[in-house]
Amino acid sequence: MSVYEAWVQGELGLFTDLKYTSIEYPKIEKHELIIETKAATLNFADLLLASGMYQSNPQHPFVPGFEVAGYVKECSNESDFSVGDRVVAATTVFRSGRHGSFGEVCVVSENLTYKLPEKISFEVGAAILMSYLTSDFALHRRAQIKQNELVLVNAAAGGVGLSAIQLAKISGARVIAAVGSESKKKLVQQFGPELVINYREENLKEIVEAKFGKRPLDIFYDQVGGEPYEQGVRLLGSEGRALIVGFASGNIPSQLLSYLLVKNISIMGVFMISFEDDDKKYLQSRMKLIFDLYTNQQIEPVYKTIKFEEIVEYLDMIGRRETVGRIVAVR
């Protein structure tokens, strides 16, 4: 049996149980590719995956890792890709696949694979992929953002949050950023939001309403859940839109529907991955636009590169909220 080396989760437990060892070499199914991993992005969802708290549950043993940049190693004769193509892609782990990007190779969805321009490095491509594509999908496809709208971005110092700030500003919107520390506040201020709030030390609702008036938000971009979500929703004005991107706090809110009714508020789910089947051409066009924004120096992904052997260490730092931007492991 052919094998390859990877960070392997042998059984349900913690991400700290990951071991760098051998696992059987994958076989591709219809609309899948095998990628030689050059760069893999770490996500909070990797922690959830290890403990069985993510919405997909791969059979054990499996390799985590949702995003990859690398070379196409295997594809079908009917594929739009060729062996050797430089690409970024979402792995099939998001739908219970067993071969994520924390290994020498991984399996990806062909419908969520995009050719990487020669001008863009593998680590930059990995840092851009899901953060900017998710934020673009949320702001444009779901919320249909308009010029001069006021947007609050929660967890604004993470890779997704920073991408949301940049894309909202490019669209002509005004941005408020919420972060969890003074060091993160200083980082986010470099990207020009009108207001940055440390929600651990400052009262988010009081400060926002003191500057912008009562319930001033048009869009609330939330990846956190819990109390920060509750505060953000109550800052939305009539016909405001709350974008639900994730629940990093581990606290999934239950929404009082009567409040949404009387305030004319919309709650919008954001799961860009579903468009691999619903409208892959839309995602392709948006990914091209994002790459163009990067090559034209209109966006600036914030990321740190690490060695592959440091993946577990940095997953722990992500879990303790000690990272900013994106963490990209290179091999």
Image (cartoon, rainbow, N blue to C red):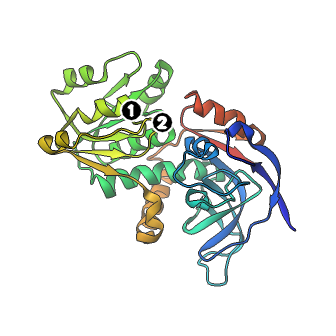
- Extreme residue toward the bottom, this view: 77
Label disc, if present, on residue 95 of the rendered structure: none
Kind of residue at badge 2: Gly
- Extreme residue toward the top, this view: 201
- Of marks 1 and 2, which one's residue comes earlier in the chain? 1
Instruction: Name the residue at 19% across, 27% down.
Output: 212
Instruction: Name the residue at 43% across, 65% down.
Output: 275
Q: In this view, does 86 lie above or below 240?
A: below
| Res 89 visible | no
Label disc, if present, on residue 226 of the rendered structure: 1
- Give x and y (percent) for residue 143: 28, 52
- Find residue 94 and report its image quarter: bottom right
Q: Which class describes the residues within 10 Å of circle 2: few (<14), some (14-19), or many (20+)? A: few
Residue toward you, 185 or 171? 185
- Find residue 45 and report its image quarter: top right
Label disc, if present, on residue 250 of the rendered structure: 2
